[in-house]
Image: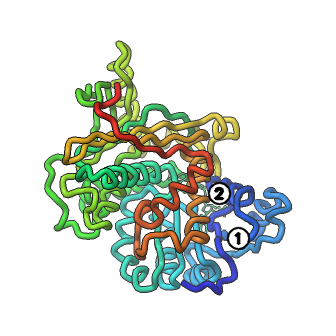
């Protein structure tokens, strides 16, 4: 990658809800030497965003580019060492920029949670990015950084102890509070529409190994579907229900395993659930939340009910307010058992709304990590994952930013 670019980091989509937060994070935390620019389709909206960032950003260049204009995207990719994009839905707006970055040898990161978009990105851009030395890193927000780095840290802990391969591994969301933006809803509905209309795309989304670099080489470990309903988990000793982000996170974690030559193990079975504890109220809570999640998914997928719901939902550009972002949080545990029978627990936690406050830290630190920590990053290029592109370097940055990412060996599962 060229070091003679005009800028180190450009935020494309800086006038959107998530983009403004990422730009704000970089204004507050980018070290003095980082050259940052803001990009989007409207010079005026970008100027408004920049004006709100204070004196530190007053000289940041503004770059006008439109996702439908490949010439403007090529110029954007050539202008910076790292482009972070919050222009979504990515399936509609994202692929041309990934292609431009792959061809220019420019590192790229985004916030997508759209499996179909990432599959297309892999199929169309991986080889070009690998040849040009570009790191293309999708899912650099709440989905899927905690999952992907958490499992990587468990693998590194087990390897350091010579404790064997990872086998049954379960992520449990034990606490979560936050909101949702119009852009996220539009992205979810866009993928749902495509899946409803096309049986082949439906099969891709439901494949646990949808993002594999080599589908035929993946192990056959039986039923690996994402849990859909409430159930008591005897091993975790708690009631569990589905986790809304499992459909993307599990595919990203399995891709990380495959990109590392199945280093976690060939019998690595991974799932994600929401934990409801073991109190007398837990079964009802688990059943109610699971049913509500199904109903919300169905309501948004079905045209007429979606039309009824839409006046109540945030529009693109809107999202959770300052108080919701400040008072939100997430707490995640990841339990694993190795082939040698040793158990480990990872704890991943952060304050701030997971999808917006914590996510702007994750994407902001990703941008800084790709731009500033190059000599600490794994020697890989292509369409990667947070764990395989940045791994320990990103984990260290997030800890410095106040996030908890810790592992420990345990003799028995926690109650
Ligand atoms: N993984 C996570 O944890 C996470 C968290 C938050 C968001 N997200 C994802 O991030 C994406 C953005 O969400 P959001 O809430 O910020 O959405 P948003 O507020 O609607 O912002 C979308 C941005 O895209 C820009 N845009 C739209 N069409 C464009 C085009 N043709 N060319 C250039 N720019 C264009 C918009 O520019 P204008 O201002 O000019 O309209 C705006 O800046 C969504 O896909 C969402 O799912 C993921």
Q: In which quarter of the image is residue 272?
A: top left
Q: Position of residue 411 (x, y in %)?
A: 29, 33
Q: As rendered, which of 192 and 125 lies closer to the eye?
A: 125
Which quadrant of the figure contains the C terminus?
top left
Q: As rendered, which of 71 and 6 lies closer to the eye?
A: 6
Labels 1 and 2: the sequence-earlier one: 2
Q: Does the residue labelled 1 lie within 8 Å of ligand 1?
A: no
* Residues marked 1 and 2 touching at CB (< 8 Å): no
Residue at (54% x, 42% y) in the render: 310
Circle 1 crowding by C-alpha within 10 Å: few under 14, some 14–19, many from 20: some
* Image quadrant, ligand 1: bottom right
- Secondary structure, mark 1, is loop
Circle 2 crowding by C-alpha within 10 Å: few under 14, some 14–19, many from 20: many
Q: Position of residue 222 (x, y in %)?
A: 14, 49
Residue at (38% x, 76% y) in the render: 126
Which quadrant of the figure contains the N terminus?
bottom right
Q: Tell me the residue that label 2 is attached to.
A: 22
Q: Which colour scheme is used?
A: rainbow
User: Would you say residue 192 is visible in this rendering?
Assistant: no
Q: Tell me the residue that label 1 is attached to.
A: 34
């Amino acid at each position: 990658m060229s070091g003679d670019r005009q800028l180190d980091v450009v935020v494309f989509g800086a006038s959107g809800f998530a983009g403004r937060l990422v730009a704000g994070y970089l204004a507050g935390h980018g070290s003095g030497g980082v050259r940052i620019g803001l990009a989007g389709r409207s010079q005026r909206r970008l100027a408004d965003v920049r004006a709100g960032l204070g004196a530190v950003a007053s000289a940041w260049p503004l770059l006008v580019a439109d996702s439908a204009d490949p010439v403007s995207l090529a110029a954007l990719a050539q202008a910076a060492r790292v482009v972070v994009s919050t222009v979504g839905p990515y399936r509609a707006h994202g692929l041309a920029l990934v292609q431009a970055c792959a061809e220019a040898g420019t590192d790229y990161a985004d916030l997508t949670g759209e499996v179909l978009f990432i599959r297309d990105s892999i199929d169309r851009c991986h080889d070009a990015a690998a040849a040009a030395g570009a790191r293309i890193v999708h899912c650099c927000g709440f989905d899927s950084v905690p999952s992907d780095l958490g499992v990587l840290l468990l693998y590194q802990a087990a390897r350091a102890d010579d404790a064997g391969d990872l086998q049954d591994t379960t992520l449990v969301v034990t606490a979560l509070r936050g909101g949702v933006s119009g852009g996220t809803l539009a992205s979810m509905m866009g993928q749902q529409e495509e899946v409803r209309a096309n049986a082949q795309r439906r099969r891709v989304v439901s494949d646990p190994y949808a993002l594999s670099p080599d589908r035929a080489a993946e192990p056959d470990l039986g039923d690996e579907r994402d849990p859909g309903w409430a159930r008591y988990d005897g091993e975790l000793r708690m009631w569990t229900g589905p986790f809304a982000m499992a459909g993307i996170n599990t595919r990203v974690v399995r891709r990380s395993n495959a990109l590392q030559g199945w280093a976690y193990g060939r019998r690595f079975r991974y799932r994600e659930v929401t934990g409801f504890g073991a109190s007398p109220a837990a079964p009802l809570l688990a059943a109610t939340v699971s049913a509500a999640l199904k109903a919300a998914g169905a309501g948004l997928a079905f045209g007429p009910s979606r039309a009824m719901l839409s006046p109540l939902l945030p529009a693109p550009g809107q999202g959770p307010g300052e108080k919701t972002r400040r008072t939100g949080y997430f707490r995640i545990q990841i339990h694993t058992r190795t082939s040698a029978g040793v158990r480990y627990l990872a704890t991943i936690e952060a304050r701030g709304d997971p999808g917006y406050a914590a996510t702007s830290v994750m994407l902001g630190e990703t941008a800084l990590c790709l731009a500033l920590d190059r000599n600490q990053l794994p020697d890989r290029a292509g369409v990667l994952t947070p764990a395989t592109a940045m791994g320990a370097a990103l984990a260290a940055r997030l800890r410095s930013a106040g996030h908890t990412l810790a592992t420990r060996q345990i003799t028995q599962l926690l109650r």
